[in-house]
Amino acid sequence: MTEFPDTTTTSDPSHDAPGEHGDDAAGYYTPGEPIADTKAPGGPIDDRWSTRKFEARLVNPANRRKLSVIIVGTGLAGASAAATLGEAGYVVKSFCYQDSPRRAHSIAAQGGINAAKNYKEDGDSVHRLFYDTVKGGDYRSRESNVYRLAEVSVNIIDQCVAQGVPFAREYGGLLDNRSFGGVQVSRTFYARGQTGQQLLLGAYQALERQVAAGTVTTYTRHEMLEVIVVDGKARGIIARDMVTGEIETHLADVVVLASGGYGNVFYLSTNAMGCNVTASWRAHRKGAYMANPCYTQIHPTCIPVSGSHQSKLTLMSESLRNDGRIWVPKNQADCTKDPRDIPEEDRDYYLERIYPSFGNLVPRDIASRAAKNVCDEGRGVGPEVEGVRRGVYLDFSAAIARLGKEGIEEKYDNLFDMYERITGENPYEVPMRIYPAVHYVMGGLWVDYDLQSSIPGLFVTGEANFSDHGANRLGASALMQGLADGYFVLPHTIRDYLADGPFEKVADDHPAVVEAQQSVRSRIDHFLNNNGTRSVDSYHRELGNIMWEYCGMERTEDGLKKAIDLIRTLKDDFWRNVKVLGTNESLNQSLEKAGRVADFFELGELMCIDALNRRESCGGHFRAESQTEDGEALRHDETFAYVAAWEFAGDPESNGMGTPVLHKEDLVYTAIEMKQRSYK
Amino acid sequence: MVKGARSTRSTIALKMLMAVSGIIFILFVLLHMYGNLKAFAGHDAYNEYAEHLRTIGEPMLPHAGLLWVIRTVLVVSLVVHVWAAVTLWHRAGKARTVKYQVKKNAASSFSSRFMRWGGLTLLVFIVWHLLNFTIGKVNVSGGATNDPYNLLVDSFDVWWLTLIYLVAMAALGLHLHHGVWSSAQTLGLTNNAKARRNAKTLGWIVAVVIAGGFSLVPVFVLAGVISK
Amino acid sequence: MRLTLKIWRQPNAEAAGAMHTYEIDGVSEDMSFLEMLDVLNEDLIAKGEDPVAFDSDCREGICGMCGLMINGQAHGPEVTTTCQLHMRSFKDGDEIVIEPWRADAFPVMKDLVVDRGAFDRIIQAGGYISVNTGSAPEAHSVPVPRDDAMRAFNVATCIGCGACVAACPNGSASLFMGAKITHLGELPQGQPERDSRVVDMVAQHDHEGFGGCTNIGECTAACPKEIPLDVISRLNWDLHAAMRHGH
Ligand SMILES: Cc1cc2nc3c(=O)[nH]c(=O)nc-3n(C[C@H](O)[C@H](O)[C@H](O)COP(=O)(O)OP(=O)(O)OC[C@H]3O[C@@H](n4cnc5c(N)ncnc54)[C@H](O)[C@@H]3O)c2cc1C
Ligand code: HEM
Ligand code: HEM
Ligand code: SF4
Ligand code: F3S
Ligand code: FES
């Protein structure tokens, strides 16, 4: 990992409101028409979803068999949607790039899933979950979407329990809860440290049940490389069979993207190796707006980087912050000592010190930045990588004294094992070392209340869309969103669209199909015939370094402008000089990666432009120019309370990004009052 | 997808047949071993026992009636056991036609991996054994064959015959060591770690008792303790 | 450290394969096994040779995508997944033999990549609880004893990696199947379909060409999630019960 630049703060940052400096991103984009979500009904917030469900037109069961749905992605969002739409009787095709739907990246989620069940009777409610999520997102999410999310959260738990998801239980046989990152109620349901796995297996099994029933067909080891848009409507996709190399056309009445997040633009992240932006980016190039791409979540509890060979970072569940205490030595001189020899009074439990009421449980962005700050001060611990010790202690000795080793084992056994395997250190004896890493992206394709993108007939669910988390996601909310979208939201909203179907059949040789096919083929041909000198991975790593350095935990105007230049130069070099061996007609992992990295380049550039435009600090997006006197994030609601929805304006044929067009969707809060976040 | 699946047509059903027939064998060999040990009681007691076997149940059953019942059960079990073993062996062969260049065994006992060859050894042994003592009544020393006790002693006075028997008993011991726990597992009786440990212990006990018990007679004949 | 790697190379499913030998230097003990292979692949690409194809995705031991036979052991010498195996388990000068999972039900597609679709089809045969979205009762309406829930969870952690099949001398998938049967069979929600589930899954297992289990126990030793042999007993018990109920 490269060193993070020293950022200079302006003299009186709290007055450094945008406007005074003009538009940071001027010249990098074209202002466009404002947009709005036209689908959410008005009226009291708690009636909106039932109103929308009632108003959404029905499709009679006999007609459903004539309607076809393509779903790209089999994570929580995709698998749950495929299963539910299959049950309803639609003809569903489900795609994933792994060898089985069960391996989608959702499987890796550890901590848990939120739901407003209020089983603990500790003051939780739909409204409080809504409130916490909007506040957690730093008032940059759409309130009607978030309210709906909180509302259906309770159904998710019922559904999963009925499927046999083995959630943790209390002795009385009822479900257990824990409190999780940044909230003061216990509403997180969990299955030890493997909640995502168990939820995904539930959805996967429901999906496979529909495969057996004949309503869903799965296409594994298939990568979607293009959307087919006919007469302004999404009507299919081009997918490459990753084993035979065949470029296949799949047509349908509607297309759903549930293709997950793009954190891998940073190369090192906690995401799976294959996570990519290709599905979303191809849709973006065909007209789907990309919203808030710069909102990235950096997770505070990851295992620090050990060397340059590193291919990915491993997350230690956030739940560890419930029992572990985070500290660094007060004195730089102690940083190389055995932590057990550092006396209590020489330890700085900095989160507990700075944020006494939330302590170790402050939201992720705050915890991450605080860790960065103490390491930048030279008080980091662990091995020195490129001159800096990037690590802080996460100490369980107090918890072990309180709960006993068995108590800790029962809660975190697999995480402790994993830590030991990776670092060679036993966390029951020596405090863990952690450091922030890229983890989740709040940005994604723009969707309306129906989860429909700006291309009619193209729906986007799960992490791939932007809607529910604003500028920062609370822990245990992504799983909730994925399943809410797939089980309970999309199946209702999509029927309103399908009620107009079946649409006119698209011929295999329709110009739109041919064009999409050709675009895919010409990219593949380019890579294979390029005869360059550098491997795809080496470009990806370099791009990742740029992104982490300039568009990571802290962003500045100068840094972002520099990053854009660097990305453009590197991208040019990539297209001229990348080396991909082998053929298309076989399993070719370099070829797969080349396509993904090509799209990451364009996305990276847009992320920097978006970050440049947003001269405020909100949630995961921290602009050094916008902070309070004591270094906390400072929002500018009067200027930036909008969703930045970017329209692609490059030449679709070439690899140029062009000058993207910015459409603003104003965020209006009726059920909640915008406040500066404070966790002190 | 398989349509109209039946439990009875599965590999597991085959395994259950093996387990049941195997358990029948175990009961038989236990009894048989007990009978053999009568050799220590001397010529008359042993022959009386052999005769008794043939007269149980008379007059309800014809002469040697129970013996025939047992024989029938044994033959059926043997056919079933061997047929199932061969079928499973064949399936396993087809399940992995390309072998590993290097393959380590991390946890399995030698006995578990020797089941098939050991079973084959037992089959050959049984054929020879029946020729030796029941069907053919071969007396390699050339003595009389109509006196069970004498036939026994004559046979094991020959060192290589004793050796064959001891090898067979080793095979039997191994077969039982795995077979006992394995049949418990196949019948679904080892649903937790404790039950599994118990079944494995029982396997050791049965193996040692039966293989050891059977070996006593040939060894003691050869050693001259048991003699005509 | 410096290592000699013997790796199975096979261009595609139809082609014949063979072992190839590669030398690799500068491997650090903090690398994961797959990162070591990444380094090898960068070398190969630089030399213009086709990189070695192997599967991985999460690289944190949960997706089940990775899986190599390393020196004759599925996932290598530690009880973990290949992606979580670190080079500190090897030493300078070691020779490492790397092969794909071998089972006819898992055909090799390229080099070290195999097709485990058979596992999905076993799940399709009945590895689920039939409940349509929206028709679930309130989650607290059926309490589940904590021990049952824990046991269900412990075996539900199977990641479908296929190491059990790879390690089993019979090429049997009984551990994988038993884990799912036990997970669902342990919960009240799983009871209604218990008989048909086991019968259908076992039939599919056999149909896919996996071997029968003879209780050898290599599977559980190779399983990165330490699924115990109990699940096979449970599988047998459930099939037995289904038989008695006339399925
Ligand atoms: C380590 C980790 C821990 C986490 N822990 C938590 C937690 O405790 N709680 C929580 O709420 N959230 C957590 N999250 C976040 C959460 O897991 C994800 O945001 C969520 O699972 C995303 O689900 P999804 O269905 O949108 O996408 P994914 O699960 O990422 O699925 C994407 C799918 O799209 C397919 N796909 C992608 N591109 C293509 C293409 N081009 N062609 C074909 N198919 C494609 C993939 O094959 C895959 O099936 C965690 C995330 C990580 C990385
Ligand atoms: C005559 C004495 C024999 C006895 C007492 C005996 C006993 C058993 C038992 C108890 C089992 C375990 C069944 C299970 O796993 O569920 C078994 C398995 C087996 N037996 Fe035998 N058997 C005998 C003979 C044979 C013979 C003659 C063969 C010949 C081919 C044979 C081959 C096998 C095989 C292949 C197995 C399966 C291996 C396994 O389960 O691990 N056995 N036997
Ligand atoms: C050292 C060991 C053994 C000795 C000394 C021995 C001895 C004998 C004798 C003397 C008989 C004839 C009994 C009679 O006809 O009255 C006999 C029969 C038989 N033995 Fe053994 N036996 C031994 C081991 C075994 C083993 C291990 C098996 C099976 C695996 C076995 C299976 C049989 C069978 C099937 C018969 C035929 C019973 C009948 O149908 O009459 N024996 N044995
Ligand atoms: S049972 Fe274990 S070895 Fe087998 S697939 Fe599951 S996790 Fe892998
Ligand atoms: S190794 Fe194979 S034989 Fe059975 S116990 Fe495991 S599946
Ligand atoms: S890559 Fe996911 S388990 Fe190894």
Image (cartoon, grey):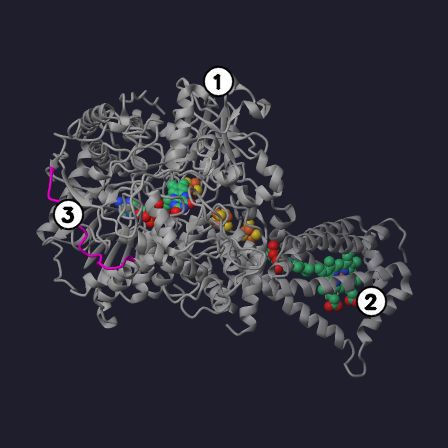
C162 lies above or below A596: below
Mark 1 lies on residue: A332
Q: Quadrant of residue A358?
A: top left
Q: Residues within 10 Å of mark 3 (few under 14, many from 20)?
A: some
Mark 3 lies on residue: A35
Q: Quadrant of residue A647?
A: top left
Disc sitting over residue B146 in the figure: 2
Left/right of residue A550 with respect to residue A432 in the rendered view: left
Nearest the viewer among A499 and C225 is: A499
Residue A227 spot, x, y in % from top left: 18, 48
Q: CA distance from mark 3 to mark 2?
A: 107 Å
Disc 3 vs disc 2: which is toward the camera?
3
Q: Is residue C21 visible?
A: no
Disc 2 vs disc 1: which is toward the camera?
1
**Chain bearing mark 1:** A
Q: Amino acid at mark 1?
A: Gln
Left/right of residue A219 with respect to residue C146 in the rendered view: left
Quadrant containing the C terminus of chain A is: top left
Q: Amino acid at mark 3?
A: Ile
**Chain bearing mark 3:** A
Q: Residues within 10 Å of mark 2 (few under 14, many from 20)?
A: few
> Which sits earlier in the primary sequence, circle 1 or circle 3?
3
Q: Residue at x 48, y 23 (%)?
A: A381
Q: CA distance from mark 2 to mark 1?
A: 98 Å
Q: Which residues are magenta?
A: A31-45
Quadrant containing the N terminus of chain A is: top left
**Chain bearing mark 2:** B
A343 lies above or below A262: above
